[in-house]
Amino acid sequence: MTIRLITAYFCFAAGLTLNTASWGNTAGVFPPVVDEGHRSMQYRITIDPDFGAWGTRLHYQQSLDGNMMLRGIIHGSENALGHSTLDFAQAELFWDLSDDSNKFRHGFRFDARVQNRSKPSLFSANYGALYQFNDAWYGRVALLNTRAFGGGADNDIRLQARALIGFRATSALNLNVEHYSQLGKLGHIAAWNKQRHQFGPSFNWRVDLQWVVSGGILSSLNDGSPNSVYRFWVTRSL
């Protein structure tokens, strides 16, 4: 039943996504929710079928209490020429500001990233919100503000926005539509054709109490990103 629902959803949603010229996006619309006692690992991979390039990342995350959680990330990629590289290491701190019973949940995520190849380090202060419309429908938004530090860094703060609308189809399966955008610099938002926008369907399938499988397709909404990319995540609770 779950496999049939996923297949039918993607056949329908594929007709709604645009296939114009996406960057290798391994990001997510993070939920501002921390569960006490949570500990998990996650593997993500994104594939650009037009060029054979891919990006991949490995997470470990663990809650400190019912409000704070730490996450560590290692990210690597391979370009269209077959050159593989370790892109960055990142530490994240989640801060849940809401009660578990609230329909509206919100919080912050603070990121510190060290990049390779003499690129500047990055720090982000991000805000996320979730609203549970009813037992089936929910929405999430995330606003990201990033500044570079170190050699070659500018003084600009760069903005991103992300959004997700989800539907709980069964007790184990969620079907979503996601949007990602890179808007440009604070105080100087880029023109539409200079921004990056991606949109597409995704799913989350809880296989059992320990394993969750997620997948999706993102397509570009303008010429600032590549064509459709395929995304696959596996999460295991520890």
Image (tube, rainbow, N blue to C red):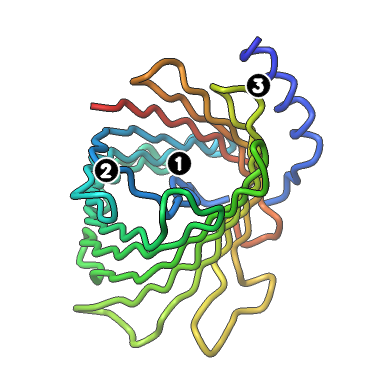
Q: Is residue 35 left or right of residue 229?
A: left
SS of the residue under disc 2: loop
User: Which numbered marker is on residue 149?
Assistant: none
Which of disc 2 and disc 3 is earlier in sequence?
3
Indicate the amino acid at tag 2: Glu
Q: Is residue 20 left or right of residue 54?
A: right
| Location of residue 117 in the rendering, given as x and y in whole percent from the top left corner | 22, 61
Indicate the amino acid at tag 1: Ala
Residue topped by disc 2: 36
User: Which numbered marker is on residue 6?
Assistant: 3
For marks 3 and 2, give the one nearer the viewer. Answer: 2
Q: Relative to the observer, which residue lies in front, 3 or 77?
A: 3
For marks 1 and 2, give the one nearer the viewer. Answer: 2
Give above or below for 127 relative to 61: below
* Quadrant of the image containing the N terminus: top right
Q: Is residue 156 left or right of residue 191?
A: left
Circle 3 residues within 10 Å: few <14, some 14–19, many ≥20: some
Q: Relative to the observer, which residue lies in front, 13 or 37?
A: 37
Q: Relative to the observer, which residue lies in front, 143 or 58?
A: 143
| Location of residue 73 in the rendering, given as x and y in whole percent from the top left corner | 25, 47
Q: Marks 1 and 2, how far apart in space? A: 42 Å
Residue topped by disc 1: 80
SS of the residue under disc 3: helix
Indicate the amino acid at tag 3: Ile
